[in-house]
């Protein structure tokens, strides 16, 4: 399978720096909207008046604006990478342990999990991410080290690291995650020690990266699975297509319909205020602004993506 | 906003007739799979060994294969058109009466409706389609006639008509729909007489069209809202983008994630065995085969679409 | 089976008129609490400052206080009588069509009904009462007339009648009931015409009776199924025991646990503000006060029953 | 408040030993029905052909039959005693942390817990028992020792003890309970260390007692809160009434309606096959037979209680 590339003439006519500049101005006028996540004390300290955006084109060029070089906690964005790794390791058998349907429920609900007997709806709900974390642990030696290397290779930034204070903070307050992991384990859908799975999960969420790092780190999803920084096939073209589809359906908690409608790109958000998105055959991108809307997505980040696809016509729809 | 067109060279290299021929052969080897819908006696009489597929390109050319000229009951595919009409009439205010999130539930569940106090999850569930039917009734004189004219204009086929036996059959056995309509009415989310809404709803579902008619009838969604047959702007470019996004998220009952993963196109299915889909900037298309899978989507139709996007690379992802 | 009677000496020491007097004073000091049901306009006109209570002893004596001779709409209290009639007609086969478990849900929820495929949780939820109404319709000629005769015989009051304005008012506003009846019908769990079932249901709810009538009308449940007024065996001793058990478990919407805890008697409430209760082997009783609590039970009626069992020791527990 | 005692003449006419003999014969003919609980390996070893029954009259006499002196794991029957202790310690404030309504769900469901934000439906579901265990831990020094002393005092048997193998077995396989405890903790509705609460919970469930011990141990609930063995007021008359009411509404998992209908006594079952019941003002009783029905209650135990109330007329209804 090969994908249809967009018409290079159309793409060439877009002045992406100008568009980013316009969005940056619009967003800064709205600073203050949204609420910073407070369930992890460390995250609550991040100031709300931050906005960054970066585009990583397939040819390696980067367009960026605002606070695109300020690091933040990637949180649930990490689920894109553990899904990639779990899918590479387990192949389609992964889908016997986690489904790929929209949740219709908040990201940490146990209700669906009970109704469906321990099979999470998708790998981007917390429950599903625990299962993919478990699959990664079963298939890779020293999974924490491996994931760190993976993120450094994808971003081309050897300084990507983990915020141990955030990881520790989650470990100490995450009763809901402990509940969920034990609940999944009661259905035999975790195979490693429950605490090991949770530790790996907290570590992946506590990675710190900036918008440029993250835009580069999803570029392989725009380019048929190939990582430009290293030349590796991170996944197949088919694999990239499929991960993009799961992002579209389930990447933004229970606002997937709203994102499809207003943004129209595969995207994955995190409570640290970051959102990565993919324009197939064109670019990986990342926005960041810490204030969240009531669904847990970056309020101004979502607005920036909305404006971006409306100004560029780059919605997949 | 203007959308990025695909590279015409890439598109030109695809031999669509050859691809349709291959798919037709593959599908016919699997004839017999799936179950014909039996809740309406008239629908249960349709033989399972039928398959048609048609592509309506933006320039007006049609590619077709198999039983693409045999008419069938469009059933829920009609919801695409009533959504278009309701959105044109009510604008964004429509979304105060029906949401646009995935359902996570079967198409005729009342549970979600009660939990969310009479606001259906999306316009493609039966409940949501009753609300859009109500909006159409409130905004157009002689809505049944208007819808028939609309479908004839979109398809360019003046012989499109309603199967009164099917409509009558639904009217007589549709206790669940009567329940649903009265339930929504109890939340004041239907404004017309309950029976009038149901009658219009049964009529829209009972339209009979073939694959070529339907492929042409969704072409406007691929072409920024413009209908090639009449030259009219059926909706805006923004409107077309948005309707496509709702189809992606909710067009195939509770198999939206599976369709996104395996097909990767905005699509809407009906229990008559038809599925329409949209390749933005490229074509409208339609497949038909009466045997359904356990989610209520055409089993071989879904397979044909899966093969089509894999062979052409035309998935939006 | 015969039941243990209470010690007549203990019973003889209770001064029931004095106790009723005390309760009456306490209740009147709280007049104004609760909200009168407003979903039927006619019911909303009833003044809140009313309270009546009547005890019908097994030997025929009646103790009464306050507005015990003022008629009100019995509403869901009627479900006790249609359950009695349906159980007599269908025997234990009734329980294949309606369960006898607590609901855990509000009285008119459709959620449980869908999860349990059209089998209502108990005969005192609206859904269950529609099924018992259907059973009565299938087994008795001219069911409306028969029920009226039944209530006149039980109460010994030939003037018991139906409030046609209330019945008509329910018929015109009861979209939720229409939804429920059609929903049950979609599971083949109504055998008569849906509208006929609804009409009979509205008529039974619209019966007008006073506290003395109603206390007498549940006396058979305290006396092994025998009606003192007519000498008839309305049901068997076993039947009376079982109906009492269903009242305990499910007679007060989703406040059954609260009633068991604070009152401790089998009881059935109605949104007209009445509550009937049974002290097995001792008496039938009825309280009435129109202001409802948030669960739909008479707020001061519940308080009066609480005080009554605490002052007399007549809780079954 | 004082309760009405039953007529001593009625009671005197019952030949309880003869009745127990008849029940014993009937039950033994049905040996083999039901399934022994297998989620704890140690419990699965208990043979199914066992049946014991004991009645502890208010005057101290005991009637017994069959294997009434064989010890078994009391499991959830222990929840009656921790409820008593928690209610004594916390008073009505207990009900802000756990409700007293029927569950309508299986005993270990997390769904209701999430819908009601960490407040369990009643103290007899596992979730509710964890909360009462937490209250006991907060209010008594060395709660394990105290509970053991309490059970020895109530039963008059100083040899009552804990089966450490069962407790350890539960600790090692109870992922669902760990999930539930952490989930409740996430709503701040456990105040002690999660592992401490679980350890105390496993210990209470692992108590081993026989039918005579347990019949004596619920006698205080039949006698206005007074323990005959020690003369202590274990709870008030009001307290006993209320605990009985909670047993009626919620003591037998989601078969409360069925028990009320067929048995008609406050009762609490355990997966070890035991069921305690209370005839207010008359006796405490206990039956035991290891085979369970599909709701988790002793199948033959339930049958024995049904026969008992039908032969004696001692149903509260």
Image: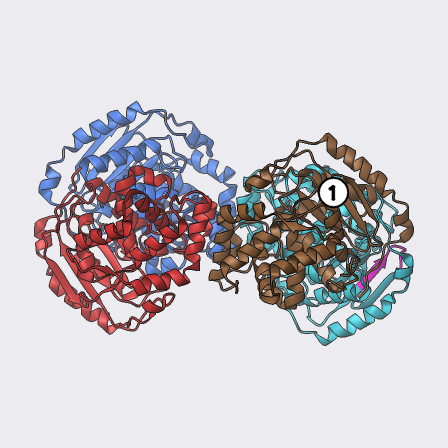
Chain colours: A red, B blue, C cyan, D brown
Whether residue A105 is visible here, answered yes or no, is: yes
Residue A197 percent across, percent down from the top left: 36, 50
Which stretch is magenta? C54-61
Residue C112 percent across, percent down from the top left: 55, 48
Q: Secondary structure at mark 1?
A: loop
In the image, C219 versus D120, the foreground residue is D120
Circle 1 residue: D69
Residue C100 percent across, percent down from the top left: 66, 46
Write down the chain letter for disc 1: D
Q: Is residue B241 left or right of residue A230?
A: right
Q: Quadrant of residue B238?
A: bottom left
In the image, A33 versus C67, the foreground residue is A33
Q: Is residue D298 left or right of residue B89?
A: right
C57 inside magenta stretch: yes
Q: Is residue B38 left or right of residue B274?
A: right
Whether residue C174 is visible here, answered yes or no, is: no
- Report the number of discs: 1
In the image, C15 versus C147, the foreground residue is C15
Residue A302, compared with residue B193, is above or below; it is below
Residue D311 percent across, percent down from the top left: 82, 41
In the image, C108 versus B178, the foreground residue is C108
Residue B221, compared with residue B208, is above or below; it is below
């Amino acid at each position: 399978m090969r994908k249809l590339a967009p018409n290079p003439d159309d793409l060439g006519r877009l002045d992406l720096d100008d568009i980013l500049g316009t969005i940056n101005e619009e967003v800064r006028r709205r600073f203050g909207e949204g609420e910073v996540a407070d369930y992890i004390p460390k995250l609550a300290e991040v100031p709300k008046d931050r906005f960054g955006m970066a585009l990583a084109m397939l040819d390696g060029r980067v367009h960026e604006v605002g606070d695109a070089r300020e690091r933040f906690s990637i949180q649930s964005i990490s689920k894109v990478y553990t899904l990639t790794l779990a899918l590479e390791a387990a192949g389609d058998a992964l889908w016997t342990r986690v489904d790929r349907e929209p949740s219709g429920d908040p990201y940490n609900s146990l209700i669906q999990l009970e109704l469906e007997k321990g099979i999470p709806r998708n790998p981007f709900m917390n429950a599903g991410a625990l299962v993919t974390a478990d699959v990664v642990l079963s298939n890779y030696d020293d999974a924490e080290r491996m994931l760190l290397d993976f993120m450094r290779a994808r971003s081309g930034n050897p300084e990507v690291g983990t915020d141990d204070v955030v990881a520790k903070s989650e470990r100490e307050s995450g009763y809901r995650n402990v509940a969920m992991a034990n609940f999944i384990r009661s259905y035999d859908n975790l195979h490693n020690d429950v605490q090991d799975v949770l530790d790996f999960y907290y570590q992946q969420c506590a990675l710190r990266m900036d918008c440029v790092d993250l835009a580069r780190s999803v570029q392989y999803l725009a380019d048929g699975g190939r990582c430009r920084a290293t030349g590796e096939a991170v996944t197949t073209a088919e694999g990239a297509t499929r991960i993009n589809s799961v992002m579209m359906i389930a990447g933004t908690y229970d606002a997937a319909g709203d994102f499809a409608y207003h943004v129209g790109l595969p995207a994955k958000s995190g409570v640290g205020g970051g959102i990565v998105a993919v324009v197939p055959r064109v670019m990986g991108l990342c926005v960041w602004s810490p204030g969240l809307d009531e669904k847990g997505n970056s309020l101004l980040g979502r607005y920036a993506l909305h404006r971006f696809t409306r100004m560029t016509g780059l919605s997949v729809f």
